[in-house]
Amino acid sequence: MSGTDNRFLIVGGGLAGLACAGCLSAAGAEPLILEGADAVGGRVRTDVVKGFLLDRGFQVFLDAYPEAGAVLDKQRLDLRPFKPGALVFAQGRLRRVMDVFREPRYLLGSALAPVGSLADKLRVALLKWRLSRTSIDEIASHDDVTTEVYLQRLGFSPRMIDGFFRSFYGGIFLERDLRTSSRMFEFTFKMFSQGSATLPARGMGDIPRQLAALLPEGTIRLSEKVAEVRAGQVVLESGECLTGRAVVLATDASTASKLMPGLGLAKLDWRSITSLYFAAPRSPLHEAIIALNGSGAGLVNNVCVPSDVAPSYAPKGQSLISISVLGLPETAGLTSRVVAELESWFGKEVHEWRHLRTEQIERALPEQAPGVGMSGPGFREHDGVFVCGDHQWSASIEGAIISGKRTAEAIFKQL
Protein backbone atom coordinates (compact mmCIF):
# COMPACT_ATOMS: atom_id res chain seq x y z
CA MET A 1 0.00 0.00 0.00
CA SER A 2 1.10 3.57 -0.55
CA GLY A 3 -0.15 7.12 -0.18
CA THR A 4 -3.50 7.53 1.57
CA ASP A 5 -4.09 3.76 1.37
CA ASN A 6 -1.65 3.33 4.22
CA ARG A 7 -2.01 6.73 5.92
CA PHE A 8 -3.76 7.10 9.25
CA LEU A 9 -4.69 10.58 10.45
CA ILE A 10 -4.33 11.32 14.18
CA VAL A 11 -5.75 14.57 15.53
CA GLY A 12 -3.80 15.48 18.67
CA GLY A 13 -0.16 15.03 19.61
CA GLY A 14 -0.61 14.31 23.30
CA LEU A 15 0.45 11.04 24.90
CA ALA A 16 -2.50 9.06 23.52
CA GLY A 17 -1.94 10.27 19.96
CA LEU A 18 1.80 9.65 20.16
CA ALA A 19 1.31 6.14 21.59
CA CYS A 20 -1.23 5.32 18.88
CA ALA A 21 1.10 6.62 16.16
CA GLY A 22 4.00 4.60 17.58
CA CYS A 23 2.03 1.37 17.42
CA LEU A 24 0.78 2.08 13.90
CA SER A 25 4.26 2.97 12.67
CA ALA A 26 5.82 -0.13 14.25
CA ALA A 27 3.35 -2.24 12.26
CA GLY A 28 4.28 -0.62 8.97
CA ALA A 29 1.49 1.95 8.70
CA GLU A 30 2.04 5.65 8.02
CA PRO A 31 0.51 7.76 10.81
CA LEU A 32 0.24 11.52 10.44
CA ILE A 33 -0.25 13.52 13.64
CA LEU A 34 -1.95 16.91 13.37
CA GLU A 35 -1.21 18.94 16.52
CA GLY A 36 -2.67 22.39 17.07
CA ALA A 37 -0.01 23.55 19.54
CA ASP A 38 3.62 24.43 18.82
CA ALA A 39 4.92 21.25 20.49
CA VAL A 40 3.76 17.73 21.29
CA GLY A 41 2.72 16.58 24.75
CA GLY A 42 -0.74 17.99 25.30
CA ARG A 43 -0.99 18.68 29.03
CA VAL A 44 2.47 17.18 29.66
CA ARG A 45 4.83 20.05 28.88
CA THR A 46 7.95 21.62 30.38
CA ASP A 47 8.97 25.24 29.88
CA VAL A 48 12.44 26.68 30.43
CA VAL A 49 12.31 29.97 32.37
CA LYS A 50 15.57 31.68 33.36
CA GLY A 51 17.33 28.32 33.42
CA PHE A 52 14.62 26.58 35.51
CA LEU A 53 12.52 23.67 34.22
CA LEU A 54 8.87 24.43 34.94
CA ASP A 55 6.46 21.56 34.34
CA ARG A 56 2.91 22.58 33.46
CA GLY A 57 1.49 21.96 36.91
CA PHE A 58 2.79 19.51 39.50
CA GLN A 59 3.17 16.16 37.75
CA VAL A 60 5.09 12.97 38.44
CA PHE A 61 5.78 9.79 36.50
CA LEU A 62 5.11 6.54 38.39
CA ASP A 63 7.83 4.14 37.31
CA ALA A 64 5.63 1.11 38.01
CA TYR A 65 3.29 1.97 35.12
CA PRO A 66 3.38 -1.25 33.06
CA GLU A 67 2.24 0.00 29.63
CA ALA A 68 4.11 3.30 29.81
CA GLY A 69 7.18 1.43 30.96
CA ALA A 70 6.97 -0.90 27.97
CA VAL A 71 6.79 2.01 25.50
CA LEU A 72 9.29 4.39 27.08
CA ASP A 73 13.02 4.01 27.58
CA LYS A 74 13.05 4.77 31.29
CA GLN A 75 16.84 4.65 31.47
CA ARG A 76 17.12 7.43 28.88
CA LEU A 77 14.52 9.48 30.74
CA ASP A 78 16.95 9.40 33.68
CA LEU A 79 14.13 9.12 36.20
CA ARG A 80 14.87 10.59 39.62
CA PRO A 81 12.75 9.19 42.48
CA PHE A 82 11.00 10.89 45.36
CA LYS A 83 11.38 9.31 48.77
CA PRO A 84 8.45 6.99 49.59
CA GLY A 85 6.52 9.14 52.00
CA ALA A 86 5.71 12.74 52.81
CA LEU A 87 6.18 15.57 55.25
CA VAL A 88 2.78 16.61 56.56
CA PHE A 89 2.19 20.06 58.04
CA ALA A 90 0.02 19.38 61.10
CA GLN A 91 -0.30 21.03 64.52
CA GLY A 92 2.06 23.83 63.50
CA ARG A 93 4.99 21.78 62.22
CA LEU A 94 6.08 19.32 59.54
CA ARG A 95 5.68 15.67 60.53
CA ARG A 96 7.27 12.75 58.65
CA VAL A 97 5.08 9.87 57.44
CA MET A 98 7.00 7.27 55.43
CA ASP A 99 6.45 3.93 53.75
CA VAL A 100 8.17 1.99 56.52
CA PHE A 101 8.44 -1.15 54.38
CA ARG A 102 10.96 0.69 52.21
CA GLU A 103 12.20 3.11 54.88
CA PRO A 104 12.20 1.00 58.09
CA ARG A 105 14.43 3.48 59.92
CA TYR A 106 11.40 5.80 60.13
CA LEU A 107 9.14 3.13 61.64
CA LEU A 108 8.86 4.67 65.11
CA GLY A 109 8.65 8.27 63.97
CA SER A 110 5.98 7.49 61.37
CA ALA A 111 3.99 5.44 63.86
CA LEU A 112 4.02 8.26 66.41
CA ALA A 113 3.38 11.12 63.95
CA PRO A 114 0.01 12.76 64.79
CA VAL A 115 -1.36 12.01 61.33
CA GLY A 116 -3.98 9.35 61.89
CA SER A 117 -3.80 6.63 64.53
CA LEU A 118 -1.56 3.58 64.76
CA ALA A 119 -4.56 1.54 63.61
CA ASP A 120 -4.81 3.77 60.53
CA LYS A 121 -1.20 3.09 59.66
CA LEU A 122 -1.76 -0.64 60.03
CA ARG A 123 -4.71 -0.31 57.67
CA VAL A 124 -2.39 1.37 55.15
CA ALA A 125 -0.03 -1.61 55.40
CA LEU A 126 -2.92 -4.04 54.94
CA LEU A 127 -4.19 -2.13 51.89
CA LYS A 128 -0.69 -2.12 50.41
CA TRP A 129 -0.44 -5.89 50.88
CA ARG A 130 -3.90 -6.56 49.41
CA LEU A 131 -3.45 -4.40 46.31
CA SER A 132 0.00 -5.87 45.65
CA ARG A 133 -1.84 -9.13 45.02
CA THR A 134 -4.55 -7.57 42.87
CA SER A 135 -4.08 -7.08 39.13
CA ILE A 136 -5.03 -3.88 37.32
CA ASP A 137 -7.70 -5.81 35.40
CA GLU A 138 -9.16 -6.99 38.70
CA ILE A 139 -9.17 -3.42 40.01
CA ALA A 140 -11.05 -2.33 36.88
CA SER A 141 -13.80 -4.84 37.72
CA HIS A 142 -14.27 -3.73 41.35
CA ASP A 143 -17.35 -1.93 42.59
CA ASP A 144 -16.81 1.78 42.10
CA VAL A 145 -17.61 4.36 44.76
CA THR A 146 -16.01 7.66 45.73
CA THR A 147 -12.56 7.43 47.29
CA GLU A 148 -13.94 8.98 50.49
CA VAL A 149 -16.59 6.27 50.86
CA TYR A 150 -14.01 3.60 50.02
CA LEU A 151 -11.62 4.80 52.75
CA GLN A 152 -14.46 5.03 55.25
CA ARG A 153 -15.50 1.48 54.47
CA LEU A 154 -11.94 0.32 55.12
CA GLY A 155 -12.18 1.84 58.60
CA PHE A 156 -9.82 4.81 58.23
CA SER A 157 -10.47 7.50 60.80
CA PRO A 158 -11.61 11.02 59.87
CA ARG A 159 -8.27 12.28 61.19
CA MET A 160 -6.35 10.08 58.74
CA ILE A 161 -8.64 10.88 55.83
CA ASP A 162 -8.58 14.62 56.50
CA GLY A 163 -4.95 14.91 57.58
CA PHE A 164 -3.28 12.72 54.97
CA PHE A 165 -5.43 11.35 52.16
CA ARG A 166 -7.09 14.67 51.27
CA SER A 167 -3.79 16.48 50.91
CA PHE A 168 -1.77 13.67 49.30
CA TYR A 169 -4.45 12.70 46.80
CA GLY A 170 -5.41 16.33 46.44
CA GLY A 171 -2.11 16.66 44.60
CA ILE A 172 -2.83 13.55 42.50
CA PHE A 173 -6.56 13.96 41.82
CA LEU A 174 -6.56 17.78 42.07
CA GLU A 175 -9.50 17.73 44.48
CA ARG A 176 -9.70 17.34 48.27
CA ASP A 177 -13.29 16.07 48.45
CA LEU A 178 -12.06 12.59 47.48
CA ARG A 179 -14.95 12.28 45.02
CA THR A 180 -12.70 10.46 42.53
CA SER A 181 -13.45 6.86 41.52
CA SER A 182 -12.21 4.30 44.06
CA ARG A 183 -10.89 2.24 41.14
CA MET A 184 -8.62 5.14 40.26
CA PHE A 185 -7.54 5.35 43.90
CA GLU A 186 -6.72 1.64 44.04
CA PHE A 187 -4.82 1.84 40.76
CA THR A 188 -2.66 4.81 41.83
CA PHE A 189 -2.14 3.41 45.34
CA LYS A 190 -0.91 0.17 43.79
CA MET A 191 1.48 2.04 41.49
CA PHE A 192 2.88 4.12 44.37
CA SER A 193 3.33 0.96 46.44
CA GLN A 194 5.12 -1.01 43.72
CA GLY A 195 7.46 1.73 42.53
CA SER A 196 8.40 5.36 42.96
CA ALA A 197 7.03 8.71 41.98
CA THR A 198 9.75 10.19 39.76
CA LEU A 199 10.74 13.18 37.67
CA PRO A 200 12.64 12.83 34.38
CA ALA A 201 15.93 14.70 34.71
CA ARG A 202 15.02 16.94 31.75
CA GLY A 203 11.45 17.59 32.87
CA MET A 204 8.10 15.88 32.34
CA GLY A 205 8.10 17.18 28.77
CA ASP A 206 10.83 14.68 27.99
CA ILE A 207 8.19 11.92 28.02
CA PRO A 208 6.28 13.10 24.92
CA ARG A 209 9.54 14.20 23.30
CA GLN A 210 10.84 10.65 23.57
CA LEU A 211 7.64 9.20 22.10
CA ALA A 212 7.82 11.69 19.22
CA ALA A 213 11.48 10.84 18.55
CA LEU A 214 10.49 7.21 17.90
CA LEU A 215 8.36 8.23 14.91
CA PRO A 216 9.64 8.65 11.33
CA GLU A 217 10.53 12.15 10.22
CA GLY A 218 7.52 14.03 8.89
CA THR A 219 5.00 12.13 11.03
CA ILE A 220 4.08 15.20 13.10
CA ARG A 221 2.69 18.50 11.79
CA LEU A 222 2.62 21.19 14.50
CA SER A 223 0.43 24.31 14.70
CA GLU A 224 -2.22 22.64 12.56
CA LYS A 225 -5.68 23.70 13.75
CA VAL A 226 -8.40 21.21 12.83
CA ALA A 227 -11.85 22.45 11.83
CA GLU A 228 -13.70 19.22 11.10
CA VAL A 229 -13.30 15.48 11.59
CA ARG A 230 -15.20 12.73 9.82
CA ALA A 231 -14.64 9.15 8.69
CA GLY A 232 -11.52 9.06 6.55
CA GLN A 233 -11.11 12.85 6.43
CA VAL A 234 -9.75 15.76 8.45
CA VAL A 235 -10.36 19.34 7.38
CA LEU A 236 -7.91 21.96 8.65
CA GLU A 237 -8.83 25.55 9.50
CA SER A 238 -6.67 26.55 6.52
CA GLY A 239 -9.17 24.74 4.29
CA GLU A 240 -6.84 21.85 3.45
CA CYS A 241 -8.63 18.49 3.38
CA LEU A 242 -6.60 15.40 4.28
CA THR A 243 -7.71 11.83 3.69
CA GLY A 244 -6.55 8.61 5.25
CA ARG A 245 -7.50 5.02 5.77
CA ALA A 246 -8.75 5.84 9.28
CA VAL A 247 -9.04 8.88 11.52
CA VAL A 248 -8.16 8.92 15.24
CA LEU A 249 -9.40 11.74 17.45
CA ALA A 250 -6.82 11.86 20.26
CA THR A 251 -7.52 15.25 21.82
CA ASP A 252 -8.78 16.09 25.30
CA ALA A 253 -12.49 15.51 25.92
CA SER A 254 -13.54 19.15 25.48
CA THR A 255 -11.80 19.52 22.11
CA ALA A 256 -13.14 16.16 20.96
CA SER A 257 -16.71 17.18 21.82
CA LYS A 258 -16.36 20.38 19.76
CA LEU A 259 -15.07 18.49 16.72
CA MET A 260 -17.67 15.73 17.10
CA PRO A 261 -20.62 17.03 19.15
CA GLY A 262 -22.39 13.68 19.15
CA LEU A 263 -19.74 12.03 21.32
CA GLY A 264 -21.42 13.01 24.58
CA LEU A 265 -18.14 14.21 26.11
CA ALA A 266 -19.22 17.84 26.57
CA LYS A 267 -20.61 17.05 30.04
CA LEU A 268 -17.25 15.85 31.36
CA ASP A 269 -15.92 18.36 33.88
CA TRP A 270 -12.34 19.45 34.43
CA ARG A 271 -10.25 19.88 37.54
CA SER A 272 -8.11 22.99 37.74
CA ILE A 273 -4.89 23.86 39.51
CA THR A 274 -2.79 26.94 40.13
CA SER A 275 0.96 26.36 40.27
CA LEU A 276 3.36 28.94 41.69
CA TYR A 277 7.09 28.64 41.02
CA PHE A 278 9.86 30.31 43.00
CA ALA A 279 13.64 30.46 42.81
CA ALA A 280 15.41 30.20 46.15
CA PRO A 281 19.02 30.27 47.34
CA ARG A 282 18.41 26.98 49.15
CA SER A 283 15.75 24.33 49.50
CA PRO A 284 13.32 24.51 52.44
CA LEU A 285 13.06 20.69 52.41
CA HIS A 286 16.67 19.56 51.71
CA GLU A 287 15.50 16.17 50.45
CA ALA A 288 13.55 14.56 47.60
CA ILE A 289 10.16 14.52 49.28
CA ILE A 290 6.79 16.23 49.01
CA ALA A 291 5.35 18.40 51.79
CA LEU A 292 1.57 18.27 52.30
CA ASN A 293 -0.88 20.54 54.05
CA GLY A 294 -2.56 18.36 56.65
CA SER A 295 -3.89 21.26 58.71
CA GLY A 296 -7.20 21.50 56.87
CA ALA A 297 -6.74 25.26 56.43
CA GLY A 298 -5.02 27.61 54.01
CA LEU A 299 -4.51 27.89 50.28
CA VAL A 300 -1.52 25.59 49.77
CA ASN A 301 -2.15 21.92 49.05
CA ASN A 302 1.43 20.75 48.61
CA VAL A 303 5.01 21.99 48.24
CA CYS A 304 7.68 20.30 46.16
CA VAL A 305 11.29 21.21 45.43
CA PRO A 306 11.89 19.55 42.03
CA SER A 307 15.60 20.45 42.14
CA ASP A 308 15.94 18.31 45.29
CA VAL A 309 14.69 15.37 43.18
CA ALA A 310 16.49 16.23 39.93
CA PRO A 311 19.16 18.96 40.33
CA SER A 312 18.88 19.77 36.61
CA TYR A 313 15.55 21.50 37.28
CA ALA A 314 17.44 24.57 38.57
CA PRO A 315 20.68 26.39 37.75
CA LYS A 316 23.64 25.42 39.87
CA GLY A 317 23.50 26.94 43.35
CA GLN A 318 19.74 27.60 43.24
CA SER A 319 16.57 25.70 44.13
CA LEU A 320 13.25 25.50 42.34
CA ILE A 321 10.15 25.50 44.52
CA SER A 322 6.78 24.37 43.13
CA ILE A 323 3.61 25.12 45.09
CA SER A 324 0.17 23.75 44.22
CA VAL A 325 -3.08 25.51 45.00
CA LEU A 326 -6.20 23.63 43.96
CA GLY A 327 -8.63 25.43 41.72
CA LEU A 328 -8.31 28.89 40.20
CA PRO A 329 -8.20 31.46 43.02
CA GLU A 330 -8.02 35.19 42.38
CA THR A 331 -4.44 35.92 41.31
CA ALA A 332 -4.29 39.45 42.74
CA GLY A 333 -2.15 39.19 45.87
CA LEU A 334 -1.96 35.41 45.59
CA THR A 335 1.84 35.26 45.66
CA SER A 336 2.12 37.28 48.87
CA ARG A 337 -0.68 35.26 50.53
CA VAL A 338 1.01 31.96 49.69
CA VAL A 339 4.40 33.17 50.93
CA ALA A 340 2.85 34.44 54.17
CA GLU A 341 1.12 31.08 54.68
CA LEU A 342 4.33 29.14 54.14
CA GLU A 343 6.20 31.24 56.69
CA SER A 344 4.53 29.07 59.34
CA TRP A 345 5.95 26.00 57.56
CA PHE A 346 9.50 27.13 56.84
CA GLY A 347 10.16 30.35 58.73
CA LYS A 348 11.47 33.71 57.52
CA GLU A 349 13.52 32.21 54.69
CA VAL A 350 10.42 32.22 52.46
CA HIS A 351 10.87 35.98 52.04
CA GLU A 352 14.11 35.28 50.15
CA TRP A 353 12.23 33.42 47.43
CA ARG A 354 11.95 35.05 44.01
CA HIS A 355 8.70 34.54 42.12
CA LEU A 356 9.20 33.01 38.66
CA ARG A 357 5.72 32.27 37.39
CA THR A 358 2.12 31.61 38.37
CA GLU A 359 0.39 29.18 36.02
CA GLN A 360 -3.38 28.71 36.18
CA ILE A 361 -4.39 25.53 34.39
CA GLU A 362 -8.13 25.36 33.91
CA ARG A 363 -8.08 22.00 32.15
CA ALA A 364 -5.51 20.17 34.22
CA LEU A 365 -7.21 16.80 34.71
CA PRO A 366 -10.51 15.35 33.51
CA GLU A 367 -13.04 14.53 36.19
CA GLN A 368 -13.13 10.83 36.98
CA ALA A 369 -16.19 10.10 39.05
CA PRO A 370 -17.24 6.57 40.04
CA GLY A 371 -18.36 4.60 37.02
CA VAL A 372 -16.28 6.69 34.60
CA GLY A 373 -13.09 5.14 33.27
CA MET A 374 -11.13 1.93 33.81
CA SER A 375 -13.93 0.05 32.10
CA GLY A 376 -14.58 -0.87 28.50
CA PRO A 377 -11.94 -1.10 25.80
CA GLY A 378 -10.23 2.25 26.49
CA PHE A 379 -11.41 3.89 23.26
CA ARG A 380 -14.59 4.27 21.25
CA GLU A 381 -15.63 4.44 17.62
CA HIS A 382 -18.13 7.10 16.59
CA ASP A 383 -19.37 7.68 13.04
CA GLY A 384 -16.30 5.93 11.64
CA VAL A 385 -13.81 7.89 13.78
CA PHE A 386 -11.74 6.29 16.56
CA VAL A 387 -11.67 8.32 19.79
CA CYS A 388 -8.95 7.89 22.40
CA GLY A 389 -7.35 9.76 25.31
CA ASP A 390 -7.02 9.57 29.07
CA HIS A 391 -10.75 10.37 29.31
CA GLN A 392 -11.40 6.96 27.75
CA TRP A 393 -9.52 4.89 30.37
CA SER A 394 -7.96 6.64 33.37
CA ALA A 395 -6.90 10.22 33.98
CA SER A 396 -3.18 9.45 34.05
CA ILE A 397 -0.12 9.08 31.86
CA GLU A 398 -0.68 5.33 31.91
CA GLY A 399 -4.32 5.79 30.94
CA ALA A 400 -3.45 7.93 27.93
CA ILE A 401 -0.86 5.44 26.66
CA ILE A 402 -3.17 2.45 27.21
CA SER A 403 -5.91 4.22 25.26
CA GLY A 404 -3.60 5.08 22.37
CA LYS A 405 -2.17 1.56 22.10
CA ARG A 406 -5.56 -0.13 22.28
CA THR A 407 -6.92 2.18 19.60
CA ALA A 408 -4.11 1.19 17.23
CA GLU A 409 -4.75 -2.49 17.94
CA ALA A 410 -8.47 -2.03 17.27
CA ILE A 411 -7.76 -0.29 13.96
CA PHE A 412 -5.68 -3.23 12.73
CA LYS A 413 -8.28 -5.77 13.84
CA GLN A 414 -11.04 -3.89 12.04
CA LEU A 415 -9.17 -3.06 8.85
Image: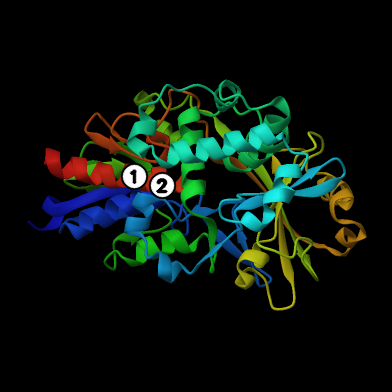
Q: Left or right of 5: which side holds 78?
A: right
Residue 278 coordinates in the image, percent (x, y): 76, 60
Answer with the quarter of the image where residue 245 lies.
top left
* Residue for point 39% across, 39% down: 133
User: Can residue 395 be seen at all in this image of the molecule?
Assistant: no
Mark count: 2
- Left or right: 353 as drawn, with respect to 213: right
Q: CA distance from mark 2 to mark 1?
A: 6 Å
Q: Is residue 259 left or right of residue 328?
A: left
- Is the Cβ of the residue at disc 2 closer than 8 Å to that at disc 1? yes
Q: Residue 230's x, y, as percent?
A: 26, 36
Please tell me the numbered disc located at residue 402.
Answer: 1
Residue labelled with disc 2: 398
Residue type, label 2:
Glu
The amino acid beneath tag 1 is Ile
Going 61% across and 36% down the picture, which residue do you hit? 122
Q: Which sits in the foreground, 367 or 284?
A: 284
Q: Quick one: which residue is furthest to the left in this view?
A: 1
The x and y percentages for residue 335 are 82, 50
Q: Quadrant of the C terminus?
A: top left
